Amino acid sequence: MKVDYIALSVPVFFILIGIELAWNFYRKLNYYRFNDSIANLSQGIGQQLTGIFMKTALFFGYKYIFENWRLFDLPQSIWIWIILFIGVDFFYYWFHRMSHQVNALWAAHIVHHQSEEYNLTVALRQSWFQGWFSWVFYLPLAFAGFDPIMFLTLSSFNTLYQFWIHTRAIKSMGPLEWILNTPSHHRVHHGSNPKYIDRNHAGTLIIWDRIFGTFQKEEEEVYYGITTPLASWNPIWANVHYWDELLKTARQSPRWMDKINVFLKPPGWFPAHLGGFKSAPEIDPLIYKKYDPQYHQQLTGYVLVQFVVGLIAGSAILFLHSSLPSPALISGATFVILTLLTCGALLEEKKWKVKFEYARLVLGILIVLLQDFPIGYQVIFCGLNLCSAVWFYNLQKKNVDAEEIPEV
């Protein structure tokens, strides 16, 4: 039986985030910002929803190779499990390393590195499209004859292991730093400091970075994020912005070889006529500033409630998708994505936020009424959206009135 261990671990993720958040407030560490955390968690919800439409196909790609082209019949002994664990971690290292060295792969993976904070919500900040190609790196395991369910189990636990290392609360782990990927090692990996870029690609075992020359110890302060900040809380733009940059560069390149190289070369590569390779700039602490646009603080409660609604709806879809008809699945996932989008728009004070939010609330009502949901769910959801519309109207009215009060 195929079990989605990552989906089952979601409650644990939020419990651990709550513990770290409490520790953050207790120690006044400033590891969290509301807008950044909402953006990170939105990426995680979106990744799980978009993954619904691809996970089965990708799993059967591995399964087909195993059933038709495997070279060996391997027993499910403890030694085979150990070998497969090492194999999964080894191929994860190379997938991860290539995702930093090939622009077309980095265009997807970049999402995980966009946050300028470093806390457990960053672990859930995942690309919506990375899973569409990452599985290819593991196909040698299918050819070797490793059972698909064993592979799926160990690859899931490889991912689960990496959740807890996204924290600043744990400094050094002593001798374990030599063998395991730790918070200290992974903080380096998320750094935009030039000396930290493209280092420590490990999943569970840091030995691969030590063997293949990509290890870097944490030394000076880490500045998190990407060299050209995303400067947006928009979850859709976060997943496509680098593709937009690559396409613009390709259009500016008259030579076909340059157009192709734009997607195959490492990040920072440009054709000669556009200046050639551009190295990551050094960070000046005196002028460094995180993206943090101002927004009306009265919106905080509203955004939080809408995000929770999106989280609950997304979780329900995640656990019930196999029993949902396609129209309900697609429309439900669309509503959740729009909910995440409106949270980002409100936190950025986008000009289109008001019309968009009313349209989203109306669309949500239409979706639930047109689907064959139990009457109780329809009443609750429609009532919630109507209450949200009234709440949002009052918030906007207060904000407009406040802006019209002349300064004395």
Image (tube, helix red, strand yellow):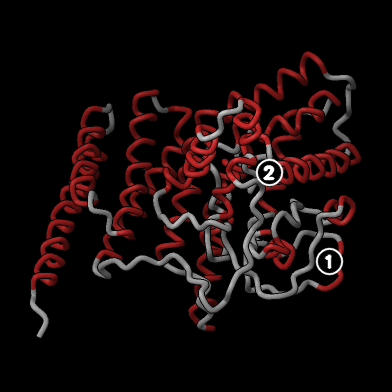
Say which of marks 1 and 2 sits in front.
2
Give the amino acid at mark 2.
Pro
Give the amino acid at mark 1.
Leu
Residue 131: image quadrant is top right
Mark 2: give few (<14), some (14-19) or many (20+) Cα within 10 Å.
some
> Residue 402, relative to residue 41: is it above or below?
below
User: In front here: 43 or 154?
Assistant: 43
* The C terminus sits in image quarter: bottom left
SS assignment at label 1: helix
| Label placed on residue 266 | 2
User: In front here: 335 or 342?
Assistant: 342
SS assignment at label 2: loop
> Residue 206, relative to residue 223: is it above or below?
above
Q: Position of residue 214 (x, y in %)?
A: 81, 55
User: In front here: 25 or 316?
Assistant: 25
Residue 75: image quadrant is top right
Q: Position of residue 251 (x, y in %)?
A: 50, 32
Q: Is residue 74 rendered to the left or right of residue 147?
A: right
The residue singled out by tag 1 in the image is: 176
